[in-house]
Amino acid sequence: MTDQQWQELLHILAGEQPAKPPIGFIIDSPWLPGWSGMSTLDYYTSDDLWLRANLQAINTFPEVMFLPGFWSEYGMCTEPSAFGSRLVWAEQNLPHADQVVASMEQIPGLQQPRVTTDGLLPFMINRLKLTQPQIQQAGHKIRFAIARGPLNIASFLMGTTEFLTTMMMDPDKAHDLLGKITDFIIAWLEYQRFTFPTIDGIFILDDIVGFVGDQECRDFVAPYLTKIFAAFKASVRFFHNDAQGLVCAPYLESMGINLFNFSFNHTMQEMRDLVGDNVTLLGNVPPRDILAQGTAQDVSKAVREMVDSIQDKRRIIWSCGGGMPPDVSSENINAFIAAIKDCVK
């Protein structure tokens, strides 16, 4: 993000009304390779192609805040790789991380990763080091320390069904696993910030939060996310959960979160009523069915419905309900931008 975009984001989080309606999208490997004309594997394995795709996006759509901006990642394999997961790669599809923990009895023996050396983490850091001069030459800076959330990582290490079953059948072992993962996440965030002092944001993604009930959210989600978002004093504390988002919404502010990306299944006003007035909302046009598979007219109609669904336009960044999915065309992004400019005054 540029200095101007960063300052605009901080003003929005403070409740100030920007001169122009803010538009932002989460972009990473599900969308960028295909949109920029390269394979997913090329995107992951070539720093030059990764940089080219990201620069192409920011230059094509200068009105858009792309979040987190120049995201160095390897899909869902990033964090599991540090725990020793076997990684399966494909030319055009996203990679997959195999399970590491076959049963809950193995949790106590799970080794804590070293964030400076283990898995793909050094590759992520070095990619940013190598490309940082070009990123800064383009007027941007590395702004966010990023990680998948504790439940998300646990579901990859164990399997989603197996981990959720462990939460119910042996909560002590589930807490043991979440505690180890949380310590890893905090060390990983701190290492990113130490390496790149321009970082002033924390970005955590965890869709598995949407799979639990209220009591489980209070017991297995809130304590760990609260600890993570307090890892360092970040101006932007950004959380993504585009699964069922109502369960965590009432606890976001108390967990230290001030920016939330959520599912298109929840209206802007519904989410505002639950999160309160102090959390900025990022959403929520349907990403796959409208932004990727719809026509430009479909996008414009969905944007109007989104804007009309909420009265108070403060602390809102107009987006889709989740990250940018595969196959979203430039035409539809431009239709989104034009519709926002026309609808939000």
Image (cartoon, helix red, strand yellow):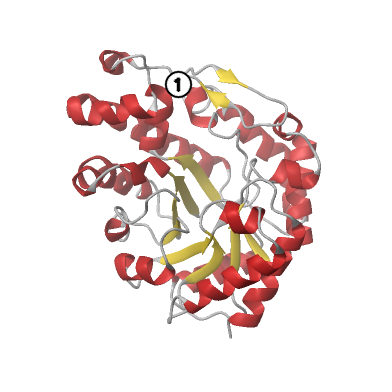
Q: Residue 321: where, in percent of width, then height?
A: 51, 57
Q: Is residue 19 visible?
A: no
Is 132 placed left or right of 288 in the picture? Answer: right
Instruction: Give the amino acid type for the residue marked by disc 1 in the picture.
Output: Phe
Q: How many numbered circles are shown?
A: 1
- The C terminus sits in image quarter: bottom right
Query: Would you say 36 lies left or right of 23 here?
Result: right
* 105 to 149, vertically: above or below: above
Residue farthest to the bottom, as pictured: 345
> Which residue is more in the foreground, 55 or 189?
55
- The relative height of residue 57 versus residue 313 in the rendered view (above or below) is above
Give the residue pinned by disc 1.
Answer: 83
Q: Nearer the viewer, residue 69 or 118?
A: 69
Q: Nearer the viewer, residue 131 or 337?
A: 337
Residue 120 image point, x, y percent? 58, 26
Q: Residue at x 71, y 65 (%)?
A: 296
Give neighbour class at mark 1: few <14, some 14-19, many 20+ (Cα, 10 Å).
many
Q: Where's the N terminus, which quadrant? A: bottom right
Q: Which quarter of the picture shows residue 48?
A: top right
**Image position, residue 278 (x, y; %):** 36, 70
75 displayed left or right of 225: right
Which structural element holds mark 1?
loop
What residue appears at the point 64 percent right and 66 percent down from the top-left corner?
299
Residue depicted at x 31% and y 53%? 248
Asked if residue 122 shows in the view, the reply is yes
Give how far across and how far down residue 331 sits, in percent.
Answer: 76, 62
Tell me: residue 136, above or below residue 311.
Answer: above
